[in-house]
Image (cartoon, rainbow, N blue to C red):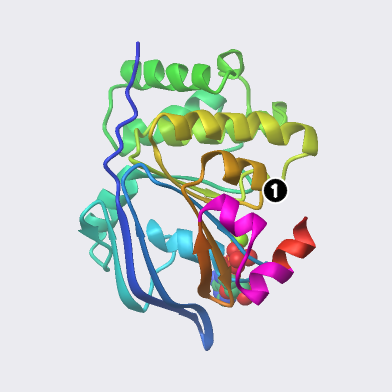
Amino acid sequence: MTLPIVSAGEIELNGVHKWFGTFHALDDINLVIAPQEKVVICGPSGSGKSTLIRCINRLESHEQGKIVVGGIELTEDEDQIDEVRREVGMVFQHFNLFPHLTILQNCILAPMWVRKIPKKQAIETAMHFLDRVRIPEQAGKFPAQLSGGQQQRVAIARALCMTPKVMLFDEPTSALDPEMVKEVLDTMVSLAKEGMTMVCVTHEMGFAKQVADRVIFMDRGRIVEEGKPLEFFDNPQNERSKLFLSQIL
Ligand code: ADP
Ligand code: MG
């Protein structure tokens, strides 16, 4: 069985602001991400990277400006939020698998309950994607029985089971032991090559150079620089980007 990964996703943020109480977490974000584009977001801790990508599937709400995903504007309308979430997969730093469910059950839950896919078909799809991330043999185990790298690959497979148009990654490798980073990045590189639209918060420069069309640097809730990965990493223009890169290199 081959399941094509469809990519028609497009994301548009226009003058977006977000406050946590009086704290200005996103300050006038303007960003258009084309279908199939790969964007890497980096920047210091607390600069708003997670908040930004969480706004794209409305895990956080914005107070001002406009966010449109795949032609659907994110407002308080629950139906529209559900519609966007069906097309947008997310992978978190800490995997967020359901600990009391097996790997297979983790993968079929949302397709069955949200997409109303029959169980047999959901299992077929789940096994297809577990195979893609090279751990079909782990399907019957529980998350705690897997290594961190394997759990993160399950999280990616689980997101893919919803056949999203867009994948959001929030520091997917930063909680992993160093020897497991590569297996997760390899999975992400192969997804990128298939034309998935990807927005990825990461400081993995090798990954960014290999797959990103664009790198965005955030500081204090603002996008302060963006450019092609080679230009950005080798010749950053902004003083804050230079300082940040000098600290992570
Ligand atoms: P990053 O991902 O770049 O490290 P975040 O987007 O997580 O940054 O956070 C940006 C800022 O917003 C931080 O100062 C953080 O403390 C604050 N923040 C994030 N989430 C919340 C929240 N739910 N309530 C209050 N403040 C928050
Ligand atoms: Mg974060």
Q: Nearer the viewer, residue 237 or 8?
A: 237
State how many labels appear: 1
- Nearer to us in this view, 178 or 104: 178
Would you place residue 86 above or below residue 192 in this image?
Answer: below
- Residue 123 occupies quadrant: top left
Q: Quadrant of residue 146?
A: top right
**Residue 55 percent location from the top left of the image:** 41, 63
Where does the magenta region start and end? 228-243
Amino acid type shown at disc 1: Ser
* Towards the viewer: 156 or 79: 156
For label 1, the crowd category at 10 Å Cα-Cα, with few meaning under 14, some 14 to 19 and many 20 or more, is some
Task: Kindly identify which residue carries mark 1.
Answer: 174
Magenta stretch, overall SS: helix
The residue sitting at 34% across, 15% down in the picture is 120
The N terminus sits in image quarter: top left
Placement of 225 over or under 11, stated as above or below: below
Q: Position of residue 88 (x, y in %)?
A: 37, 46
Left or right: 121 as drawn, with respect to 233: left
Rendered location of residue 6, percent (x, y): 30, 32
Residue 73 lies in the magenta-colored region: no
Residue at the far bottom: name it.
22
For the residue with label 1, is its CB less than 8 Å from the closest atom of ligand 2? no
Q: Is residue 203 above or below residue 151?
A: below
Q: Could you say whether the residue bearing mark 1 is in a helix, strand or loop?
A: loop
The residue at 33%/20% (across/down) is 3
Residue beneath the point at 51% across and 75% down = 222
The quadrant where ligand 2 appears is: bottom right
Q: Is residue 224 left or right of residue 151?
A: left
